[in-house]
Amino acid sequence: MTTLESILETLTTMTVEGATGKQLEAQAVMLLRLCNCEPAFLGYQPKGFKTPYPSVLCVSLNGEVIHGIPNDRKFEDGDVIKLDIGLKYADGQFDDGATTVIIGRGSSIARRLLKATQAALMAGIHAAKPGNTTHDIAAAVEAVAKQEELAVIHGYGGHGIGTDLHMEPFIPNEVTYHMEKQEDWKPMGHPERPHRSDYHAMVEVPDNPPVKLERGMRIAIEPMFATKRGHTVVGSDGWVVRLVGGGLAAHFEKTITV
């Protein structure tokens, strides 16, 4: 078990009814310090983002997919919580991982969602062999979603990782994917249409050409599934990615060496 996996396992045991994202954030800070690792997310600001990420840990609830900012909301029975953390080891290498936790027993669809998304991670890892391509990983992940009649979150996926947190290649979770163009944006059943000032409109994402996997490449594979459609919007904070149209999302991630 890697240091990052150990940290995620500890945080998972603390993700219980009545706990908060802020409490998990404090524990993540302490665990990173004990492991002599630097946080990879705190202050991270990729090109095109207006503000740096403000926390060490991402805590995304229910219909939030990724990049949820820890807050004081208490977890409730049935909540689906995504935990995502990155770190930098003393040797300068980065690691990135995520898991999803249900508070209590949860609904049958939530349990099926988690089981399928975790199975997709394992399928993606199995497909990550020298000589295969990033599309082989995508096809393996997408096949699980189709079999379980779940939606892949469009436009998001894994990435190369090493001396930087995010590197080439992009690791898609579906072979062909598009997000909706801005002029076609619709609430898709969302009970309250978000104001334009609160959300970025969706844009079309072109398909990525396959990249051949070479022995020794380090990549982060991270399937993200939803119980309804896989379209998302980004909140006015510039970070939190939420489902449009309701439903639950799950996210699992593991850094591997091909």
Image: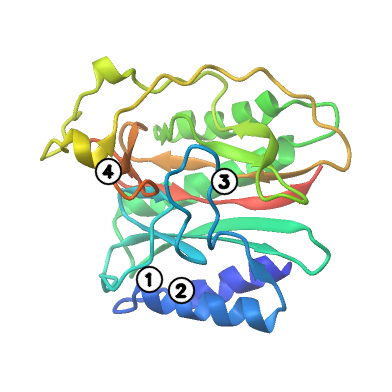
The residue identified by callout 1 is: 21
Q: Amino acid at mark 2?
A: Glu
Q: Is residue 212 above or below residue 35?
A: above
The residue identified by callout 2 is: 25
Q: CA distance from mark 3 to mark 2?
A: 27 Å
Which residue is rendered at x = 51% and y = 17% of the image?
Answer: 206
* Mark toward the viewer: 3 or 2: 2
Viewer can see residue 14: no
- Left or right of 248: which side holds 190? left
Q: Amino acid at mark 1?
A: Gly
* Mark toward the viewer: 2 or 4: 2
Q: Amino acid at mark 4?
A: Gly
- Left or right of 69: which side holds 126? right
Mark 4 surroundings: few (<14), some (14-19) or many (≥20) residues within 10 A: some
User: Sequence-wise, which precedes: disc 4 or disc 1?
Assistant: 1
Q: CA distance from mark 1 to mark 2?
A: 6 Å
The residue identified by callout 3 is: 119
* Mark toward the viewer: 3 or 1: 1
